[in-house]
Amino acid sequence: MTTPEFASRPFSPNASVRLRPELYESASVSSVGGATPLDRAYVGLSPEGMLALFESEMTRLDSEVTGIFQIQNSRNQQTAALNEARNVLSRYSFVGKSSDDADGEGDEGALSVCNGALDAALAKLPPGSEAHAALEKAKAILNAGGDAIVWETEMKSASETLTSATSSLGSASQLEMVRLQSLVSQKQQVLSLFSNVLQTHHQMMMSAINNIRGG
């Protein structure tokens, strides 16, 4: 493997160097002398350079992990608000009769309660979030007729809107968890890598000292 151009000089954190993914993937593969391709690629760094590179990599990975946790917390809040609204709407899932019924009327009281639940959920979320948009859409559906009455078809459509948003948030959270597991694995590989590189450097230094003494 070709040694990177910066391997022979101290590493500068400002250089924005990142370990390449293919090197992460090969870090656990044994090779001649017990060193992996990743080990050999960075064995030329000085101890100070290796420490700077290690700190840079760990900082980057920690930042990405923190970002995922923040996103997950936001999704959890959105999901909780959606579920609260859905629970209220589910109590009135069969109120009102179809607007096609000549003698049927929707439930005016249900509309007031559901609007209150949607407003309460909206107040807990920042505008622009996926759940906020879904709640606004559901409220627009319930109030589309402008008659202060909620019909069964409107209630069903509004509930489906909230259910779809909840499912979407759940799917996104699962993908983020896979990414989180990958980042944790990368952190473990970085720790192992730099432990191996430092050990190799120490052995080289001791060998040089022994040669001098032996000379």
Image (cartoon, rainbow, N blue to C red):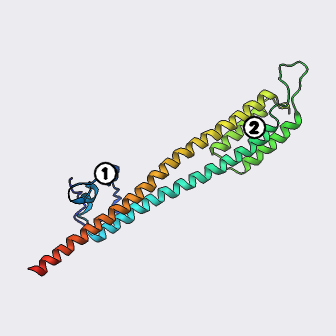
- Residue 77: give its label: none
How many C-alpha atoms fall within 10 Å of the one at disc 1: few (<14), some, or many (≥20)?
some
Q: Do the residues labelled 1 and 2 touch (CB within 8 Å)?
A: no
- Viewer-closest of 111 and 143: 111
Give the quadrant of residue 146.
top right
How many C-alpha atoms fall within 10 Å of the one at disc 2: few (<14), some, or many (≥20)?
many
- Of the two numbered discs 1 and 2 in the rendering, the one whose residue sits closer to the viewer: 1
Q: What element carries label 1?
A: helix
Image position, residue 44 (x, y; %): 23, 64
The residue located at (33%, 58%) in the rendering is 17
Instruction: Please state if 136 lies on the left or on the right of 180 as rendered.
Output: right
Q: Is mark 2 on a helix, strand or loop?
A: helix
Residue where numbered disc 2 is placed: 139
Image position, residue 64 (x, y; %): 47, 55
The residue located at (57%, 41%) in the rendering is 171
**Amino acid, disc 2:** Lys
- Viewer-closest of 74 and 32: 32
The residue located at (34%, 68%) in the rendering is 51
Decide which of tag 1 and tag 2 comes sooner along the chain.
Answer: 1
Image position, residue 41 (x, y; %): 25, 57
- Viewer-closest of 193 and 95: 193
Q: Is residue 12 visible?
A: no
Residue where numbered disc 1 is placed: 26
Image position, residue 33 (x, y; %): 21, 59
